[in-house]
Amino acid sequence: MKLIHKMTTGVATAAITFAGTLPAFAAEKWDMPMAYSASNFHSVNGMEFAKCVTDGTKGEIEITVHPGGSLIAGADIKRAIQTGQVQLGERILSGHQNENAIFGFDSIPFLAPSFEASDKLWQAAKPKIEELLAEQNLTLLYNVPWPPQGLYFKKDVNSVEDMKGVKFRSYNNATSRLAELTGMLPVTIEAAELSQAFATGVAESMISSGATGYDQKVWESLTNFYEVDAWLPRNYIMVNNDVWSEVSEENKSVITGCASDAEARGLQASKDYTQFTYDGLREGGMKVEPASDELMSGLRAVGETMTAEWLESAGEDGKAIVDKYKSMQ
Ligand code: PCA
């Protein structure tokens, strides 16, 4: 309709006739790749967000979600958004710690091991993360934490000693480093490929949430889950800045409204999913229990090393985030 205002009366008449046979606007189609299975709570939440935007903009922006890495594999999603190959998408930002150590702030062992602590840590990190994303042509729409991370094995593990030589699936720098420091053998595998990796023996353990073990039915290959509550990593829904700057103010406010609803809904789903998926793992036949004191103290020592390493590589900005977080306690 905007176009018609600019036209002379004569042309406008023709345009109105034309408009009568076509939709009054050109619907924009946005693709939203997500890395995790369609049934995962992040993906379900993302689909609701997409619907909220499509409905709220009256179809002016129509978002299609592609879960399970079906359009773009997890590791490539961030770059695809930055370069405009897709308009928006979801990525676990700690998977890009090698671009900037700050991106790993949410995967520091035992720094913020509960939903409450993780929320404070996020508040402390948010301005810096948004600034770094802006430098990469990205705007954060919302983010949602995964449930607390615990350890999966196919045997009883009571100490760090028991972890030696085990093939360990990693999903970011912190998980690879955890494997190295405990004498395990890290191999990076996308969540969507997990059931196959465990079934074929490419990996035989991992650190992850109950949610991912449940989604991937890991009880078909693994036997033990230890509640370690190491950290709560976050998934980020980001939009390309060139795309974002073209969105009308009205539609921007629809999208940010949908995003803030999705953030609250996702957080609640993550909380609810924690116990639900522990029960599901048990029903699948796994032993689900807290880690032994011996295992925990070994892991805490590894955590201290990793914290020191992270602070070293994240410099002043990293220290400022941790200090701000600690001042919120
Ligand atoms: N699930 C994802 C990341 C963290 C989590 O709980 C995964 O295992 O890939």
Image: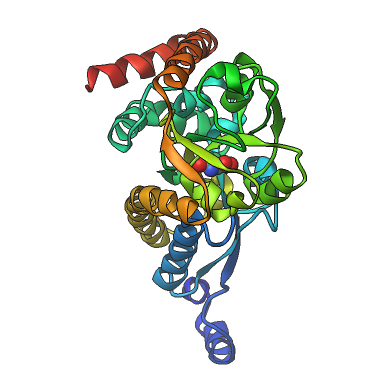
Q: Nearer the viewer, residue 95 or 279?
A: 279
Give the image location of residue 173, x and y in percent: 61, 25
x and y percentages locating residue 278 in the rendered image: 42, 48
Q: Residue 80, relative to residue 265: is it above or below?
A: above
Answer with left or right where residue 284 lies relative to residue 79: left
52 is higher (above) or lower (below) than 175: below
User: Is residue 136 among what the camera can see?
Assistant: no
User: 328 or 16, which lies in front?
Assistant: 328
Please state the quadrant of the image where ligand 1 appears: top right
Q: Residue at x 46, y 51 (%)?
A: 282
| 242 displayed left or right of 233 | right
Quadrant location, the C terminus: top left
Residue at 57% across / 38% down in the picture? 137
Residue 230: x, y in percent?
Answer: 44, 28
In this rendering, is residue 251 above or below 285?
below
Q: How is the image coloured?
A: rainbow
Q: Residue at x 55, y 83 (%)?
A: 23
